Image: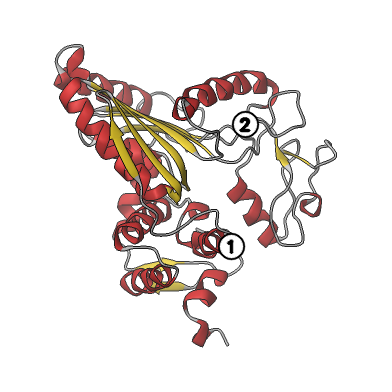
Amino acid sequence: MRECLNVPSINKKLLYSKISKQLKSAHFNEDEVGAIIRSWEYAHLSEKYSHGFDRLPWLLEMVRVQKVVPNTQITIKNNGLVTTIAGSKGLGYLAAEKAVQEVIKLGKTNGIGFATIYNCYPTGCIGQYTEYITQATLIGFVITHSSPRVAPHGSTEAIFSTEGHSFGFPSNDIPYIYDSSVGAITNGQIMLLNKLGKSLPPKSVLSTNGAFTENLNDVIDEKGIFNGVIASAGGEHAHKISGLTGSLELLAQLALVDKTKTGSYSFFMSVNPSLFGNPVKYQSLVSELQSQIHNSKSESKDQRVYFAGQQSYMKRQQNKEKDFVSISEETFKLLFPEESV
């Protein structure tokens, strides 16, 4: 169930048609529109609504303020094991799909492959891309960097981005997909809480004066933009997550070598298990671990234990069968202004 003030249900085909029309009116080309809808569909099916179709008003605003420039040429260069993809505020969704295609090709050919993305934004749910890589029976690893929003442990200053990162491992059935970020809360969750008129969780966000706050008025400006600082995840173990975050950031910065620093960059990697031996045996080992996790004793008789990515995968399979999609009232008004009067 969606936790939202008003969620009209729209026929899926009609929704995609309306969104495509809006995106083309904003001058996105056919390839860009396809990449956007695929990313939003993956997020929506996974019930990660803050990264799904309700991103339409936000993306159009990013176009208006020129943080994303539609129909921008993306350059792709390869030097053997590494592909570099660059754009001038180009669409990250499309660049990420290109990066996946490149690391799959390199992983199949060379056993390992890398791709970096420079100055393209946004990229959406990272698990989408590692899942694509596992479908080629490869191991995938992805890190994305956007504007700094997260403070290192013990700091009040936004140094890190939310550093979305994901590992994907091929199995005999459902892939093992770990997909996470490093903040105590996501920007999407903050904006949802603001719409619902709720408070922030304790010790999750700092205001610009460096103090923790639960009052959204302290961190949302008059334009509805978040201007606070997100604390590092992990609670009493936040120092460990903070150390991991710095490590992820340093890997992602491989995209910046020989380039001017920018706010948006990503790192993609694929590994072919055949480098180490029988890839079918490796997939069986992944499946064996998944089974051990899922069938292990749970803390409660009413709960099951799930391996990474299992619940999200199950949600997508169930939601694929639905002909109607729920969207926010804001998105509905944008797509159907004649019915919102």
Question: Label 2: how many residues lie within 10 Å, few (<14), some (14-19) or many (20+)?
Answer: many
Q: Secondary structure at mark 1?
A: loop
Where residue 131 appears, x then y in whole percent? Answer: 31, 38
Q: Is residue 148 above or below residue 329?
A: above
Q: Which comes before the other along the chain, label 1 or label 2?
A: 1
Tell me the distance, in whole angstroms, between the alpha carbons under discs 1 and 2. 29 Å
Q: Is residue 274 left or right of residue 271?
A: left
Q: Is residue 266 above or below residue 323?
A: above
Kindly identify the amino acid type of the residue bearing the numbered disc 2: Phe
- Measured as percent of width and height from the top left, residue 303 is found at 46, 36
| Residue at horizontal 69 percent and vertical 55 percent from the top | 225
Residue 179, position as x, y percentages in the image: 44, 35
Which residue is depicted at the point 48% across and 47% down?
121
Residue 35, numbered circle: none
Structure colour scheme? secondary structure
User: At which x and y percent is residue 57?
Assistant: 54, 65
Query: Quadrant of the rendered structure where residue 224 is?
Result: bottom right
Q: Is residue 24 above or below residue 265?
A: below
Left or right: where does residue 218 sit relative to residue 172? Answer: right
Q: Which residue is mark 2?
A: 160
Using a 10 Å C-alpha cutoff, classify the residue at mark 1 as few (fewer than 14 neighbours), some (14 to 19) or many (20 or more).
some
Q: Amino acid at mark 1?
A: Cys
Residue pointed to by mark 1: 4
Residue toward you, 44 or 224: 224
Q: For residue 175, what is the image quadrant? A: top left
Secondary-structure class at tag 2: loop
Residue 30 vs residue 208: left or right? left
Q: Nearer the viewer, residue 255 or 152?
A: 255
